[in-house]
Amino acid sequence: QILWVGCAQYTAGYYAPLEAEGAEVWTLDFDPAAAVWGRETRHLTGDVCKVDQLFAGMMFDAVICNGVLGYGVDSAEQQRAALKAMAAVLSPGGRLLLGWNTDKLADPVAAGLTAELFAPSPFAGLPARVDCEGVTHIYDSLIRLG
């Protein structure tokens, strides 16, 4: 079970290949207009800070949250709430792939916003943090503690 948070035209092509490998993808976006880019029949519109309420009773093996922090989930308090809510729907040992931009917000990992809930963890031969050269985008691969 994978939850993809933040839907756009460029994300729509990823769901089918993941499902071809046995995953079941669910999507979430705050903007109702983004539903067209979400997973048909498995998309919800809502606030990532309330993802634990929106997906009550569901648990995911992975959460992909890209382009959300700094794009509506801006303050440290909002980020903390989003991370806590995502941890609540993520199985212990489950993976959070967190994409964020250095020009939009301070480093959430360095700020300690992930420390109580997640630990950095390499994935697929890549380090726990991947800095996308030439742009401000960072990907952090994290494992849910507990």
Image (cartoon, rainbow, N blue to C red):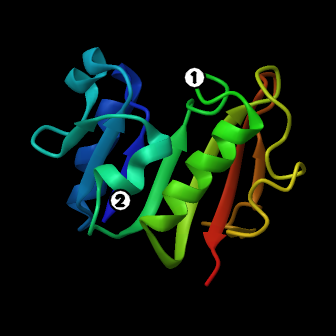
Q: Which residue is mark 1?
A: 72
Image-based side of 7 in relation to 142, left or right: left
Residue 39 x, y percent position in the rendering: 21, 39
Q: Nearer the viewer, residue 38 or 123?
A: 38
Q: Residue furthest right?
A: 110
Label 2, secondary structure: give it.
strand
Residue 5: quarter of image: top left
Mark 1 crowdedness (10 Å alpha carbons): few <14, some 14-19, many ≥20: few
Label 1, secondary structure: give it.
loop
Q: Which mark is residue 114?
A: none
**Residue drawn at (77%, 61%) of the image:** 127
**Residue drawn at (48%, 66%) of the image:** 88
**Residue drawn at (34%, 70%) of the image:** 59
Residue 1 x, y percent position in the rendering: 30, 66
**Residue drawn at (68%, 35%) of the image:** 100
Q: Is residue 126 above or below residue 140?
A: below
Label 1 and label 2: CA atoms lie apart by 22 Å
Q: Nearer the viewer, residue 47 or 97?
A: 47
Residue 146: quarter of image: bottom right
Residue 96: quarter of image: bottom right
Image-based side of 61 in relation to 21, left or right: right
Image-based side of 105 in relation to 41, left or right: right
Residue 83 x, y percent position in the rendering: 60, 53
Q: Which residue is mark 2?
A: 2
